[in-house]
Amino acid sequence: MKLLHTSDWHLGRMEGNERSLWEDQKYAINEIYRIAGEEKADGILLAGDVFDRSIASTDAIKAFDEIIRHLCVDMDIPVYTIAGNHDGAERVSQHSRLLRKAGLHISGSLQREPFVVREEGVDIFLLPWITTDKVRSVFPEQAEEIRTMEDAFRVVLDCYREEFREGCRHILVAHAFIEKAETSESERATEVVGLAASVPAAVFDGFDYVALGHLHGYQRPGEHVYYSGTPMAYSFGREESHRKSVILYDTEADPDQAVRRIPVRQLHARATLTGELEALRTMDFAALESDPREHLEEDRLPEEAIGNLDEYIRNGYLRVCVTDRFVGTEVIAELNRCYPNILLISGRNYEEKEDSRISLKPEELSGLETRPEEVFLRYIRDMGIEGPEDRFLELFHESTAEYREEVEES
């Protein structure tokens, strides 16, 4: 079997409270369709966090239904998936027995009996997100020995290994944090709490391939253990340089050739632009503190972006850091005209020492249009004018009242 490993789609994800990422997600999913077709994949291993929220939005559920219908019905490719920590286990696994007939195999919540799909020469075990409390409740006779997440995985996987068949490849789909694995900014609180919930890769010994979800960058934390990473970038920092991908595992290939990583092209670049205002204004990327073009290999780009890299970056999702100016409404408006998809802008702070910074989302700027007092106060601060803000607002209201009277009289 040729199995395509992907994870952490986070359908329904929003950038802040304003911007839907569905167009980017749809582009990445279309890439998965393309790769699955070109590689003649026999199945999709989807390792959790299908949705971004445990109570998924109507649009996210509708999107998932369309994706699964296309894969399982139109392309005749079965999907083997589990609930991750972001997914609502009960919602994900509704009608799971009925859906098996259509080619969708879902494990939403840990059960006593291993969830295993037996194909010809291949056993695919589906292990959803677990906690120590959940494992204790499913295996009460071993509750006292389950003190850590490592204990919990050992108990569950020992049970799974008892179901191994002679002469078969044994594949595990799971959602977990592996010791010493690298996180990124989009994994909410993972780096803070992950150490307490992390497990060594050795807990998966005996499986021929472990398809993991949970962390957003491609990694191989164990000999047969892989994170596919997300099919698109969800944060700045480390994810900017991630080469987003899926993994193809061929159960019939020689072990040293069985695993192949395949890049997924991105609809929008995600980059941080740091430099002086003039370089940012003129898109002189070579003059910035780091050139965003250095991370963009050709196989990450849409076809229309090849040979037009500067424009691809200009239209990307950007974090812009101005190093030589205060961040004011005029600067933000000007940069917004240059870069239509800025998500965050920062600049020197007018109140603190020179190396301190303030940040503002463009949505905050557009919101100021309906709050003239805030626009005025921000202007006062940007200009470095000192004095009591209450008095400034009093003068502002007096001036605007006089102006309205003059307009009415004319």
Image (cartoon, grey):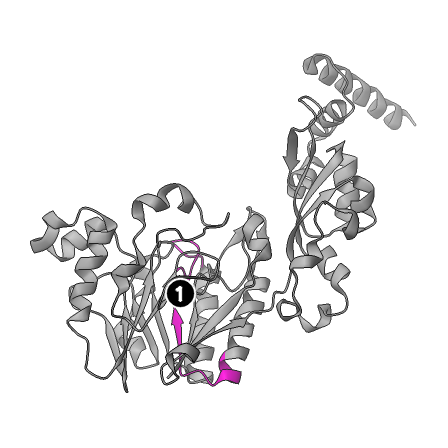
Expressed as whole percent of the image width and height from the top left, the position of residue 274 reads 70, 43
Query: Taking 95 as reference, is 407 above or below it?
Result: above
Q: How many marks?
A: 1
Mark 1 residue type? Tyr
Q: Is residue 338 visible?
A: yes
Of 378 and 62, which appears nearest the observer?
Answer: 378
Extreme residue in the front direction: 256
Whether 233 is drawn above or below 2: the answer is: above
Res 315 seen here: no
- Where residue 301 appears, as percent x and y from the top left, is 66, 68
Residue at image position (53%, 52%) is: 14
Position of 378 with respect to 201 (left or right) is right
Query: Considering only vertical position in the picture, is 137 above or below 75?
Result: above
- Residue 253 horizontal/vertical position (percent): 39, 84
- Residue 27 in the image: state x and y as whole percent: 58, 68
In the image, residue 53 lies in the stretch drawn in magenta = yes
Residue 234 location, quadrant: bottom right
Q: Which residues are magenta?
A: 36-57
Residue 372 in the image: above or below residue 55: above
Name the residue: 78% across, 40% down: 276
In which quadrant will I find the C terminus? top right
Q: Is residue 321 magenta?
A: no
Q: Quadrant of the N terminus?
A: bottom left
Q: Along the line of sight, which residue is nearer the eye, 199 or 111?
A: 199
Q: Is residue 408 left or right of residue 163?
A: right
286 lies left or right of 257: right
Q: Residues within 10 Å of mark 1 (few under 14, many from 20)?
A: many
In the picture of the structure, the residue carrying the numbered disc 1 is 226
* Residue shown at 25% from the left, 60% from the top: 203
Of residues 287 and 99, the one drawn nearer to the viewer in this rendering: 287
SS for callout 1? strand
Magenta region's main secondary structure? loop
